Amino acid sequence: MIITAALLLVARPKFALALSPITSGPTFAKVIALTFDDGPHPFHTPQLLDLLDSFQIKATFFVVGVKAAENPFILKNIVKRGHVLGNHSWSHPNLSKLEGKEVEEQIRFCNQAIKAITETPPRFFRPPGGNWNNRTLDIANKLGLQTVLWTINGYDAGFDSYSPQALAKTVIRRATPGAIVLLHDGGNFTLAALPLIINTLRKEGYSFVTLEQMLHKPIKPISLAHSN
């Protein structure tokens, strides 16, 4: 029986063994990771960085390669201020509809842009629109990236009738220890909602961390819950 199971595993295509995307961090500490997709943006990103600085919060930015290449000084500034960069593809296509070679180019080109500008390769990858398949995960993994989705979607992109209050309410209501929050770099709704999100969740005992801190560094349940 054991031998049969082992043979079945060996016989399965390699892409079928791809790890599932990460959707949350450890749940034993009241920490939350704010993540921002689709930047860098020449106007909104500097405002977002200033806002995060005012709250002494570090976040994770999933950047689009072509935008990074167009805004290298902003990308460097993100890293200089202590935030973490992630790969969000080169030009933001639906990767699940592309051929393997195209998927690899999208991810690899973004990796190269980030490394060329900041001298540091990214460790995390988020597929545009959250569209992925096993092949996407396998390619990202081969390129040294962990695929990270989210626990909470703020729905702050493309919703004209949405309000900052509604955005904040969505995030606050769904907050749980270890949650990864999907927001976007480039919207006034997000900038307006963040102070309410941050202040409310801090009152509830949450701290804000980067994905690097959440997933790759030891978390102390007691002390970290009271830190910035």
Image (cartoon, helix red, strand yellow):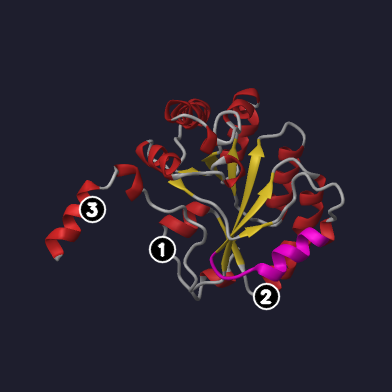
Q: What residue did someone put label 1 on?
A: 218
Q: Secondary structure at mark 2?
A: loop
Give the distance between the C-alpha atoms of the residues marked 3 and 1, in whole angstroms: 32 Å
- Is the residue 65 above or below the residue 28 in the image? above
Question: Which numbered disc, 3 or 1, marks the residue that appears first in the sequence?
Answer: 3
Q: What residue did someone put label 2 on?
A: 204
Q: Secondary structure at mark 3?
A: helix
- The three-letter code of the residue at mark 2 reads Glu
Compared across the picture, whether 73 is left or right of 101 comes to right
- The three-letter code of the residue at mark 3 reads Leu
Picture coordinates of residue 93, whole percent (x, y): 59, 32
Which quadrant is the N terminus positioned in? bottom left
Compared across the picture, whether 48 is left or right of 101 comes to right
Which label lies toward us, 3 or 2?
A: 3
Q: How many marks?
A: 3
Residue drawn at 52 percent across, 58 percent down? 23
Q: Residue 196: which quarter of the image?
A: bottom right
Compared across the picture, whether 194 is left or right of 143 comes to right
Give the distance between the C-alpha atoms of the residues marked 2 and 1, in whole angstroms: 22 Å
- The three-letter code of the residue at mark 1 reads Pro
